Amino acid sequence: MKKTSLLFVSCLLLLMSGSVFTSCKEDIDDSAFAIKNEPTIADMLYEREDLSSIASIFERVRLSNADNASSLMAALSARGNYTVFAATNEALAAYCQEKIGTDDVSQLSYEQAQLIAYSCVIDNENATAYESAEFPTDGSTFLKSNLFDRLLTCEEQEAGPYIINGTAELISGDYDHEALNGYLHCISSVIAPSDKKVAELIAAADNLHIMAKLIQVTGIDSRISDERDIDYENNSDRPETRYWSSVAYSSGNNNWVIPTKRYLGFTGFVETDEVFQNEWNIDAPVLDDAGNVTNWDAIQAQLLAKAQAYYPECTDTDLTSRNNALNRFVAYHFIKGRVAYNRFVHHFSEHNYQYGSNPLNPQTNSLTVDTWDYFTTIDLDDNEYRGLIKVLQVPDGEHDIYLNRISKYNNGLRDDYKEVSTLPYQPGINVRINALNGNNDNNAANGFYYPIDGILVYDAATRNALASERMRIDITTMVPELISNNFRGQKYEAFENGYFENIINETENTEIYYLQCGWVGVGYWHDYQGDEFLFSGVFDFILRLPPVPVDGEYEIRMGCANNTLRGMAQLYFGDSPDNCLPVGLPFDLRQSTNYDTSLKQSGNPDIPYIRDEDLDWDEERILENDNDLRIHGYMKAPSYFWDSLHSSQCRQQGSDNLPCLRKIVTTADMKAGKTYYIRFKSALKKTDSQFFVDYFEFTPKHIYNGVDPEDTW
């Protein structure tokens, strides 16, 4: 049975610098404390002699560094929704003996005690706390982070209870203790997430010696070391809240809390030593007593010869140059953003899928169709050369996740979009990733790494494969800070200008908001993957776009969910943020199709939409209407996703006063690796209009203007 919160009491505990924390509420008033007709988590801890040590730590550790701040135990005595993994006295004694040479927990430094306390508590805020039935089972992470802002992994053993964060095993029969304010679970060892960064964890693994050395000699380790933006955190001019006068609201009012932290991070896809040996016939590493690879020169020469075959244009002998084949090879393995295994794709509105009882925690047991998104790899230098990686999850079996999987589908107008075939495996294409790396920790302080089952390259074959299909990319994967700070899919959030590195040149009057369907109830939303960005005020900003994989002509489109509260913007496009040129007339998101059901046609000549069913599902007439829409700069929404109420495909929902469509932004000749930008400048003086940004499509000419019509999906 799930415990529902009686009153949302949130003490947001966020890392400031080192072990310095801040809280939205440092002391807890009497009204927050629970009525004693049911035990709180604090009561349960006090009643258990074998949990007296963790109880003493919770009493000692405060909600912030302020002298008068309340203790964490006070929070666990208050109303709320907390998930607590409590280490037993025996587990804490063993941890202390290892760390400080005594089993006396009182001898822990305050920082050490704080690490233990904050690592084992998840504040579920206004969502229900986690009982074991809701735990991840495959090494994925919980959706909510702990009080140290770290996501904890969870794996279900074949014979035995769950393991939290790779080491802490739930004690059999001693978990799912339901309290008034959450759940208490007892564990056999202390949860203490690694403080190592991604490159350091790769170097510490017992099966990644070759990749670890490659990261070092190419200098990529220095490019994946960022963890936090201290300048943002220390900015005294940053407001605590922002007032927004539009209709969307947060927590019952229009005052939005501004994030106090800006975490950065990276995610790596890495070949094991065994994969290098099997796929490329690379020598096995020989290690000395200190763990150094003694035959590295021979291995490096073999790797360089292989890499040069895939990157013949990279002839620089300097391993740290982006024009070196090994450097280019390694760089393509890392994307920006701390992406947990269960966050690569976001299940919400794909074809025939239903998210279940909780839109903020979509079910992943019953999937229907392939789900994917795209990420860009790290910048290589000031020229901003980046690659593109497609990440796709299949619905069958174990729901495996692949890199650069290219598939054919049942994609007729009224088909089911089931996968019918994929490109044959070759390096760079259809590479499977693994959630865990055996007994090695892959959950780093600034991100994650995942072992892969094949060689990952961004050669001509891979780039041509990616460019063989329409690339639909959600805006959320274009702004890695959203995932790194665990906002995606969780709640509404407002952001200060400058928070996202790929949203630039914002004017002072630009307001940026992220919305997730389900945070304040599930209405009639037309969102690809269930979330969106809104830009409000008299906005003016530039979005840095992901790179295209090959040179050519592309049609750029963006999803639009029109309504009368929206805004209008002039769009600009170019390869320099300082010199984007206007494309088309101002894009007005306030327009309806003014559909006439008796005449079965649009009453708005600017959007000549006709429902497929009103064309009797006649494919020739439907194609004619689709072409008519294209002439006016629009397309019907994809058949692929449904509205949030799961009433029908969004493609069929262009005839009401809230039409779901695609807007053709421009057609452009684009170069691979080059960075392009779209500028959005409000054409209205209204301060409360909403400009909706959801997803983009980058469609090669052979698809949108090919011999065969583009599919509707």
Image (tube, rainbow, N blue to C red):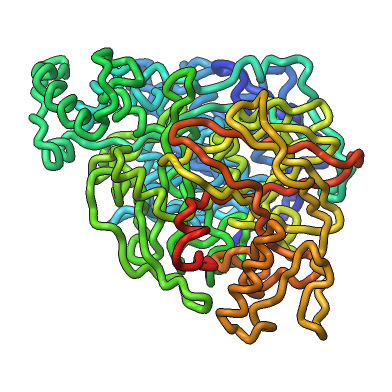
Residue 16 visible: yes
User: Image height check: is 185 above or below 91?
Assistant: below
Task: Judge by depth and name the residue closer to the eye, 120 or 451.
Answer: 451
User: Residue 644 sits in which quadrant?
Assistant: bottom right
Report x, y in % for residue 381. 44, 19
Residue at image location 57% in from the left, 37% down from the top: 545
Residue 659 shown left or right of residue 313 in the figure: right
User: Image height check: is 623 above or below 194?
Assistant: below
Report x, y in % for residue 560. 70, 55
Report x, y in % for residue 521. 74, 60
Q: How many marks?
A: 0
Q: Quadrant of the N terminus?
A: bottom right
Residue 495 shown left or right of residue 300 in the figure: right
Residue at image location 52% in from the left, 58% down from the top: 704
Residue 45 visible: no
Task: Judge by depth and name the residue closer to the eye, 197 or 608.
Answer: 608
User: Residue 84 sits in which quadrant?
Assistant: top right
User: Residue 397 sits in which quadrant?
Assistant: bottom left
Task: Judge by depth and name the residue closer to the eye, 646 or 657.
Answer: 657
Report x, y in % for residue 554. 52, 47
Residue at image location 18% in from the left, 25% down from the top: 304
Residue at image location 40% in from the left, 64% down from the top: 395
User: Image height check: is 4 above or below 491?
Assistant: below
